[in-house]
Image (tube, rainbow, N blue to C red):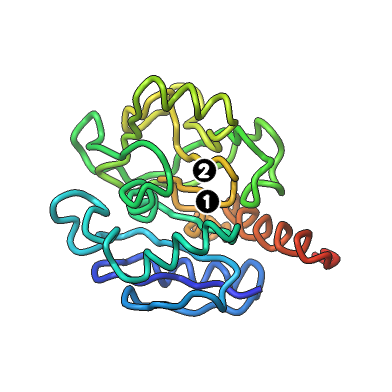
Amino acid sequence: MKFAVLVFPGSNCDIDCYKAVEETIGQPVDYVWHTATDLSAYDAILVPGGFSYGDYLRCGAIAQFAAVMNEVKKAADQGKFILGICNGFQILTEARLLPGALIRNNGLKFRCHQTQLEVVNNGTAFTNQYSQGEMINIPIAHGEGNYFCDEATLAELKANNQIVFRYAGDTNPNGSVENIAGISNKAGNVVGMMPHPERAVNQLLGSEDGKRMFTSILNAWREQHGAAVNG
């Protein structure tokens, strides 16, 4: 299985994503610059956090027009696995690969700390190694992570089981509607989330609960290709 980690001007979590793939599942992984026009060699695409294009206009608003995003859309249509983390989530919503929008945190402050999440949907390619309803510890680092959508979109997300993660209990750090921390597209092969699983792959970092996001992706790919999972 081969991973692409996209790199935009201003990305700063690309190295974290690259190292997380190496450490958790040991699969081939490449950095792919935003000017790339072919992602056909890759099975999974990670859209990392950071401040793409300086977050001018809106977070992700400029990155959505990068050449590589045309290829991300093609990959999504082909059923390949796309994971957008933090700024990557913002980019995926701006590119309309995911519904809704990310707006300023309700306290208007940048929040950076460990956060407890509830796994709402463990049936995706990114969460199949978690238990339904499991509580996991994943850090956040964002100033515009307040997920917003209208009532019709929220009803659709619920009806299609597209809410993947919620901030647990009363821990909502940013004011997101219904504590939403991560969602998927209808097909389930595109997921965006504000917390950073790539920063939770070793207990030295405070949690290793993010490791199973990467093992889940590999497990889903192996199931697709009829290969046995061997640890």
Q: Position of residue 98 (x, y in %)?
A: 43, 44
Tag of residue 43: none
Counting residues from the start of the chain, the first of labels 1 and 2 encountered is 2
Where is mark 2, residue-wise? 185
Q: Position of residue 25 (x, y in %)?
A: 66, 69
Residue 81: quadrant of the picture: bottom right
Between the C-alphas of marks 1 and 2, the distance is 5 Å
Q: Position of residue 7 (x, y in %)?
A: 35, 72
Q: Is residue 153 above or below residue 30?
A: above
Depth check, front residue: 100 or 31: 100
View extreme (left): residue: 57
Q: Position of residue 194 (x, y in %)?
A: 40, 45
- Report whether 11 appears left or right of 172: left
What element does badge 2 sit on?
loop
Q: Amino acid at mark 1?
A: Val
What element does badge 1 sit on?
strand
Residue at the spot 49% in from the left edge and 79% down from the top edge? 30
Residue at the spot 61% in from the left edge and 54% down from the top edge? 213
Where is mark 1, residue-wise? 190
- Report whether 189 appears left or right of 91: right
Depth check, front residue: 208 or 161: 161
Q: Is residue 181 above or below residue 6?
A: above
- State if disc 2 and disc 1 touch (CB < 8 Å): yes
- Report whether 28 appears left or right of 181: right
